[in-house]
Amino acid sequence: MPGDIEVAQSEQFKSSILIVDDAPAGRETMEALLFSPAYDLHFASSGAQALEMAAGIRPDLILLDVMMPGMDGFEVCRRLRADPELAHIPIILVTALDDRASRLQGIDSGADDFVSKPFDSAELRARVRTITRLNRYRRLVEERARFEWVVERAEDGFLLLDGDTILYANPQAKVLLELDEFDQRSEQPSFLAAVQQSFRCEPQELWARWPYLEIGENGAVLLLVAPETASSAATFLEMSIYGAALSDRHGQLVRLRNITAEKTTIRDMWSFHTMVMHKLNTPMHMMLGSMELLTLSSPDTMSKQEVIDLVESASGGARRIFDAVSDVLQFASTPSMISHIGEHFCLDDLPQLIDEISSQLGLHDVQLDADAPPEITLPISSRAMESIMFELLENSKKFHPSNAPSLTVRTAMEGDRVCVTVQDDGIHLSPEQLGRVWLPYYQGERYFTGEVPGMGLGLSVVASLVWEIGGDCHIANRTDSPGVTVRLRFPFDDDA
């Protein structure tokens, strides 16, 4: 941690004091002298009880009377010092013995200080106040040292920020953000600048407010995405921010966690589900429809050719199911079910893809406006593009009040990007949904089980597929009618 970050004792902490005296009058006197909101007082009437209570409450200070029957204060002190868990607790011996031999015996037993009876009230309070403060600070230093030991060896990256300035970065954070020379820099670097060297900040709508984010009780979660290259797959980092008053600077603690493997698993599960639905629904209906007609019809009312046609239709459906199952099994055996590296999708194939998905979903009002040149290819696999369009069109139907949306799909050039827009006439989303709809794991389990209407886990996977190739995603409510507009911007490859 940086040297200028000081850990101060907060007023909300109380110092616990264990007062040990066999005489009730002695305990009452101590209570009257030390009664304060700053102290939590505990009392023991014997040496054995003192040892038991010390192990339970771990006090910041023990005020220990020497002259007690059974186990005297010297013996209690020796036993406390012999216990590794209690040896660090400061002990003040309270004694009426004022001779040199008694003090030497107390020092030999492990006492930190002495108070002689009758004691001066102001002196007692001053000594107690000083020792409790020192012990509290010692504990904080030890806790801080343990925290640093864990953080320095953590697999996740941890940073302490003051606004956008990096105050501290653990070794893993330095690796993730390429901060190799962080400790040697004369000026503390900008967090956003360090992140943007290798990552895209998503969702952009939330990052636009950086560093003035609204951090709730459970913190805030953002994403850092390193798009895939010709030699490496995409990387996803989950960035958790905790607004904790760790110092006078009221810094923010940031954790960076690599969620690439988890993202890949969730994406593959979703893609597998989408593919099974897309591949099996149509041939299944074809086969079942033909078989039902054969079952319900009387042989006398059907010609031989009609029977042959129905059997061939059912047989064709069965063959398509067999082929689809073979494709699904091959798909499931692939280490990464959707990979973009070396694959492309040609815009010329988009009309047929939209027609197939519309037919499968029973959508009858889907218009395609293709303004982008059809020969342009996108650096994304056909399977991924099929999954993306299926999810967007299915969501439009699923969340339309009558499940019959009017859809417009557009393609257009925007500088060095191809923009694919899907617009429906369904419902508006809340501001919170608009800001977080692309986030993976944003209440992902609730979305997955369907407890929250209006969004699906698939939208976050759509975003991850687009982000992986360096694209971006935007969603907004329509201003001219109910419904939303989804804009996906893809880089394109002229040489594909």
Image: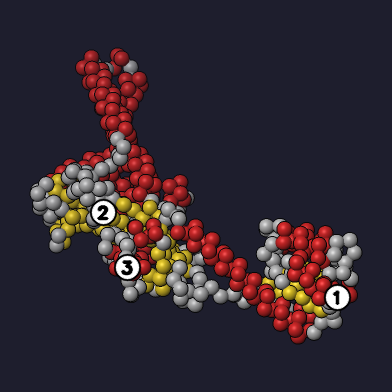
| Number of residues whose C-alpha sits closer than 10 Å to that of mark 1, classed few (under 14), some (14–19) or many (20 or more) | some
> Along the line of sight, which residue is nearer the eye, 3 or 477?
3
User: Percent position (x, y) of residue 269?
Assistant: 37, 41
The Cα–Cα distance between marks 1 and 3, rounded to whole angstroms, is 66 Å
Q: Which mark is residue 227?
A: 2
Label 2 neighbourhood size at 10 Å, few (<14), some (14-19), many (20+)? many
Query: Which residue corresponds to the image point at 35% horizontal and 49% vertical from the top-left?
Result: 260
Q: CA distance from mark 1 to mark 2?
A: 77 Å
Q: Earlier in the sequence, mark 3 or mark 2?
A: 3
Identify which residue, 400 or 217, lies in the foreground. 217
Looking at the picture, which amino acid does disc 1 mark? Leu
Helix, strand or loop status at disc 3: helix
Please name the residue shown 31% across and 52% down the image.
235
* Residue shown at the point (38%, 52%) measured from the top left: 258
Which residue has dot 3 on it? 192
Please name the residue that numbered disc 1 is placed on: 97
